[in-house]
């Protein structure tokens, strides 16, 4: 099921409605139809139900989605729930798959792979500051070599992109049942869909932490004297602060490899040994701990030649 790759991409968010009915925003089927280009008859409902004299009106500020869904994901969920049968839902997912922007192959990395899927799935993303929300928002993009799986990726990418990490964490996976998508999926595809959502939540939290760490330490690090001449050394330590290590020791061994063939680095900084202790490593294998560090170091890794890592939890010391 999960032959998928997901990366983050900006998604235009539509202004919310100011009124909801009986505590729920009315499904915006017209917006969904125009956005995805399907037959509007697929989403036709009896409009008379919204004209009841006894309906309870409240402002959207007072309304909280019962499943914690961002507005776009709520719209998609309601629209799918209105579809008459599984075949039409399946058709809509295939359409969404074809509309999904292609993902840059550079994101097809082992550390971005989603586990527990029948197909291959990768997830990547970015966090950018949003002035309207006064917070960081996460943007996703995705790819899959399985068309139906790609449709599910497109659903999550569109539904979650533009949300804050907190909003993404709040999403209840039960929305797949409300959208009546799960009933048309095999157990393997259903599990893969849930795994993708779980990985996107973890990725969102990590990206948010990285972004906040960068702002907190931007220009505020006390790096005088010798450290001001060690940009790679300082950059590595700053990037790993997001792990909140209880102990971190970074040794620059570049001098021992000076003149060696292939010993490339930024201004002579080429070889490092890292000894780090953090709760964040709890439950992760040795390989996954190293992969987490590589993800956090990002663009720093190509600028150095070698990084020896010793990563442990406080209980393993």
Image (cartoon, rainbow, N blue to C red):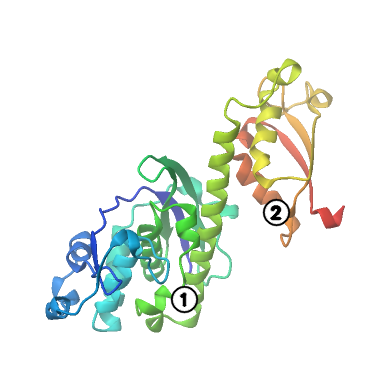
Left or right: 101 as drawn, with respect to 140: left
**Residue situated furthest top in the rendering:** 225
Q: In the picture, residue 298 is in which quadrant?
A: top right
Position of 118 relative to 241 (above/below): below
311 and 315: which one is in front? 315
Q: Residue at x 53, y 41 (%)?
A: 211
Q: Residue at x 46, y 48 (%)?
A: 105
Q: Say how many tags the image has.
A: 2
Position of 157 relative to 133 (above/below): below
For the question of whether residue 61 can be seen, the reply is yes
Q: CA distance from mark 1 to mark 2?
A: 29 Å
Mark 1 and 2 residues: CB-CB less than 8 Å, in contact? no
* Residue 242: percent from left, percent from top: 64, 44
* Residue 240: percent from left, percent from top: 67, 41
Q: Which residue is mark 2?
A: 280
Is label 2 in a helix, a strand or a loop? Answer: helix
Sequence-wise, the earlier of marks 1 and 2 is 1
Is label 1 in a helix, a strand or a loop? Answer: helix
Judge the density around disc 2: few (<14), some (14-19), many (≥20) Cα neighbours within 10 Å.
Answer: some
Q: Which mark is residue 299?
A: none
* Residue 303: percent from left, percent from top: 63, 30
Q: Which residue is mark 1?
A: 189
Q: In the picture, residue 274 is in which quadrant?
A: top right
Left or right: 315 as drawn, with respect to 262: right
């Amino acid at each position: 099921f999960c032959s998928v790759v997901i990366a983050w991409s900006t998604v235009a968010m539509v202004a919310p409605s100011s009124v909801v009915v009986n505590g729920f925003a009315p499904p915006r089927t017209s917006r969904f139809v125009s956005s995805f280009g399907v037959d509007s008859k697929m989403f036709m409902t009896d409009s008379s139900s919204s004209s009841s004299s006894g309906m309870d009106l409240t402002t959207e500020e007072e309304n909280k989605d019962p499943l914690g869904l961002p507005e776009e994901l709520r719209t998609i969920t309601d629209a799918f729930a209105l579809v008459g049968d599984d075949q039409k839902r399946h058709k809509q997912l295939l359409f969404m798959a074809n509309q999904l922007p292609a993902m840059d192959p550079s994101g097809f990395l082992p550390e971005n792979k989603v586990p527990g899927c029948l197909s291959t799935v990768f997830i990547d993303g970015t966090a950018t500051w949003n002035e309207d929300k006064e917070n960081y928002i996460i943007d996703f993009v995705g790819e899959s070599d399985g068309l139906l799986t790609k449709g599910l990726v497109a659903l999550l990418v569109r539904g979650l992109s533009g949300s804050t990490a907190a909003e993404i964490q709040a999403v209840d996976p039960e929305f797949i049942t409300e959208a009546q998508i799960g009933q048309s999926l095999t157990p393997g595809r259903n599990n893969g869909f849930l795994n993708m959502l779980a990985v996107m939540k973890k990725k969102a939290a990590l990206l948010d932490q990285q972004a906040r760490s960068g702002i907190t330490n931007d220009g505020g690090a006390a790096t005088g004297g010798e450290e001001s001449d060690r940009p790679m050394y300082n950059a590595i330590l700053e990037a790993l602060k997001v792990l909140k290590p209880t102990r971190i020791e970074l040794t620059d061994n570049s001098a021992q490899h000076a003149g060696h063939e292939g010993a490339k680095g930024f201004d002579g900084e080429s070889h490092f040994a890292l000894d780090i202790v953090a709760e964040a490593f709890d439950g992760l294998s040795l390989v996954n701990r190293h992969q987490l560090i590589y993800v956090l170091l990002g663009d720093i890794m190509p600028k150095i030649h070698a990084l020896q890592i010793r990563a442990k939890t406080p209980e393993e010391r």
